[in-house]
Amino acid sequence: MKKMIVSMLAGAMSLAALPALAADEVTLQLKWVAQAQFAGYFVAKEKGFYEEEDLDVTIKPGGPDIAPEQVIAGGGADVIVTWMAAALSAREKGVDLVNIAQPYKNAGMQLVCPADGPIKSEADFPGHTLGVWFFGNEYPFYAWMNKLGYSTEGGPEGVTVLKQSFDVQPLIQKQADCISVMTYNEYWQLIDAGYKPEDLIVFNYTEMGNDLLEDGLYVLEENLEDEAFKDKMVRFVRASMKGWEYAIANPEEAAGIVMDNGGQDENHQVRMMGEVAKLIGEPDAKLREDAYERTADALVNQGIIKEKPEGAWTADITDAM
């Protein structure tokens, strides 16, 4: 009996000495620098929502010289945040990206022009200079110009495209008649620079029906053949959306968490969080098929992609949440 007890104690001690199973690692590459545009992911990490799903998540900020599509193609991330136009373009070039979740239901892209300038409506665009970001951000703009029938090669019947810096200086310095802004970011930079809402004419892509899907979560198609990877993504998306729910309900705390992770100007982050919440709407991460079809059709019509791809999105992950 004594030997049995000693043996059992030894076995228990041996089990206690074993290291705990490591959490599954996930690397997320963001589309841009740390800001409230991505608050849900930072909140999920800070509040332990990823840990609750047995995940060890690394969040990599983006920047002007970082293309998420290239990062994941090179093995630098498991999942990325990017716009669908960029993802479908990359897919056609051989980077087989698949949308597994769509936190953003609406687009935040806008074109703004000074109210005292030459442009009052879409009919005034020809002969003028319009600013737009590149690195995959230009596709919604080009699709819109194509819809209007305007050349983007300049001249009196077309528009001149300014490759815009990632700020509002081209408008302030009068390098362009209109510039691109996001509802949650650069628009407010203009307001902070002294413009009043009535000083600006705003062309909102969503209101015009020209919105293409933004900020979705994408992985490589080949990885979805691995059931363990799919399970990991179900847990990742579930925890991320819990982070978004918390961020929307607690914008000031969320902004503080973003600041702790490299964000700039806490008041701006709080305001951004409020605007981002409008774009997310109900935080269920489900992709609307009609929005996908509109996005893909616009890209085909513009010639950005040759044909609408098969298998570019899946509901398997969100359905399993």
Image (spheres, rainbow, N blue to C red):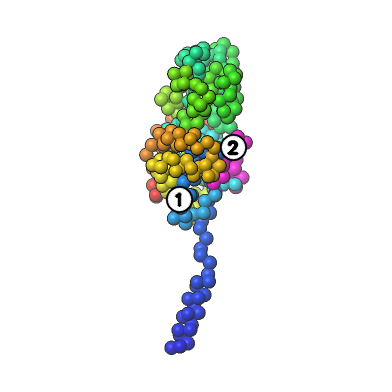
The kind of residue on which mark 2 rests is: Gly
User: Residue 80: percent from the left, percent from the top?
Assistant: 53, 43
The residue drawn where x is 44% and y is 49% is: 239
Any part of residue 160 in sight = no
Query: Which circle marks residue 77 in the picture?
Result: none
Residue drawn at (49%, 28%) of the image: 188
Q: CA distance from mark 1 to mark 2?
A: 25 Å
Provide residue 257's location: percent of width, then percent of height: 49, 44
Say what secondary structure mark 2 lies in.
Answer: loop
Q: Is residue 196 left or right of residue 154?
A: left
Quadrant of the image for the N terminus? bottom left
Using the image, determine if residue 8 lies above or below residue 20: below
The magenta-colored residue range is: 59-75
Marking on residue 47: 1
Residue 64 covered by magenta stretch: yes
Q: Please state which amino acid type lies under the numbered disc 1.
A: Lys
Which element is circle 1 on? loop
Query: With respect to residue 211, does 254 lie above or below?
Result: below
Q: Which residue is mark 2?
A: 63
Q: Is residue 259 above or below residue 305?
A: below
Q: Nearer the viewer, residue 92 or 152?
A: 152
Residue 311 on image: x %, y %: 47, 41
